[in-house]
Image (cartoon, rainbow, N blue to C red):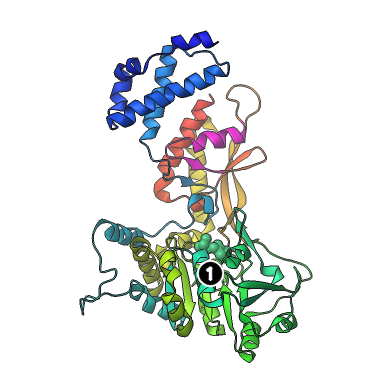
Amino acid sequence: MTQDFHRLPSVDKLLSDERIREIGGRYSYPIFVDSVRQHLEQLRLSMSRGISCPPYEEIVNSLHSTLRTLGEPSLRPVINATGVILHTNLGRAPLSHEAAQAMKGAAMGYTNLELNLESGKRGSRQTHIESLLCRLTGAEASMVVNNNAAGILLVLSALAKGKEVILSRGQAVEIGDSFRIPDIMRKSGAKLVEVGTTNCTYLSDYEEAIVPRTRFLLRIHSSNFKIVGFTQSVGLNELVNLGKCHNLFVLDDLGSGCLLDTSEFGLDHEPMIQESISAGVGLAFSSADKLLGGPQAGIIVGKKELVERVRKHPLARTARIDKINLAGLTATLLHYLRGEAISKIPVWQMISVPLSEIEVRARQWGTALPHNAYDRGIATVVEGESMVGGGSLPGSSLPTRLLAIRGQSGGEGRFTAQKLAQTLRQQQPPVIGRVEKNLLLLDPRTVFPHEDEALLSALHKSLWQFN
Ligand SMILES: *Cc1c(COP(=O)(O)O)cnc(C)c1O
């Protein structure tokens, strides 16, 4: 095997190969040479493990594709046909046209981000959004930060370090990817005191835990799970009243938080930011890129005395929102102000789209498939459910229609639903579906109508591949 090494082409030979030279010319020369070296190094490594030297043509092909992908961004748009509207792995909320335009404007030029145009003096980036947030939620004051988790950490660091914060054991949630909200909170230096049991917490549990060191009562919305059966929890109003008796504010982590009532769309009621404010919480926290339908950001609204102290804390700088997201969030909030959120914000368009429209598109997709797949029953339109997802509305779904493509076990054109799903993920743009049993399921709810053509072309290419 080792004697094979002399059959490997030299760096110079590959550098001067016409095909390699052509693609390598896209990069600076040192990067080009380095990539060729590295590629040969990889080959040498696998040969030392017993793999025989590939033919020259094969080496050129694999080097060519390595050089090609080197210059392509790994992060790219995909078509979300999963039916999960806020899919954390797919980047949560897609933005409205207006929000994207505002972000482009802020990105490509200068802005009055921290300049008071009237006085010519330094201003705060928060002023661009505060009155808007206060008007929409009824709060006295607001602050936007990089994301919700950062907001919670910042507030506890600024206001509760070395003090105790009481929360219900049933609300100590993990938000996914093994991130636990209580773990994040503890990093602030606040001591979390968990009261009650997993399924039952009573007002008296909170009350008995209140000591002079107590700084806040905390509510965390159980955003991604549901406790059913014998349960007992304390309502927000009760908690706020208890706090008042002891001179304590309630901090309310809404998770998603929203400004519109989800129950009007046949979903469970997701807690709204306005409700927390009118209940009298000290501060309410929410993510801008969940049901709000904006870019990544954390929204803190509530009492002025608390917000002012948080803004002055040194850590505020580390959680700061950037100008691009600030522009996108402002444009998103303006949709709510104008009463056009449902028609303009993609998340709400997807929640409110009529079932009949979804069904029509699923059928159109089906009849456009190759090999008469639809007429032959390989593809059918079936009833199913779309999820809101993204840490909101657990156990609540929207009825939908799915295009279902059955995996083919026998004969020519064999493919499993898994295999088809994988092939679709490798198309340009990638199409992400769901697999259940041996069915590939595609939900039109989360696919933008302007993506239909690309989705069908990806389906064609993938199905042809198996024939
Ligand atoms: C999603 C979520 C968070 C974190 O929000 P990010 O914006 O992702 O930082 C915090 N708390 C709850 C309850 C959540 O659902």
Residue 432: % across, % down? 52, 43
Q: Secondary structure at mark 1?
A: helix
Q: Quadrant of residue 215?
A: bottom right
Residue found at the far bottom of this picture: 245
Beta carbon at label 1 within 8 Å of ligand 1: yes
Q: Residue at x 53, y 84 (%)?
A: 278
**Where does the magenta region start and end?**
416-433
Residue 319: % across, % down? 44, 65
Q: Is residue 337 above or below residue 43?
A: below
Residue that carries the numbered disc 1 in the rendered image: 152
Q: Quadrant of residue 174?
A: bottom right
Decide if residue 461 is on the left or right side of residue 400.
Answer: left
- Work out whether residue 374 can be spotted: no
310 or 304: nearer the viewer: 310
The amino acid sitting under disc 1 is: Ile
Q: Quadrant of residue 11?
A: top left
- Ligand 1 resides in the quarter of the picture at bottom right
Q: Residue at x 53, y 68 (%)?
A: 153
Q: Residue at x 63, y 39 (%)?
A: 439
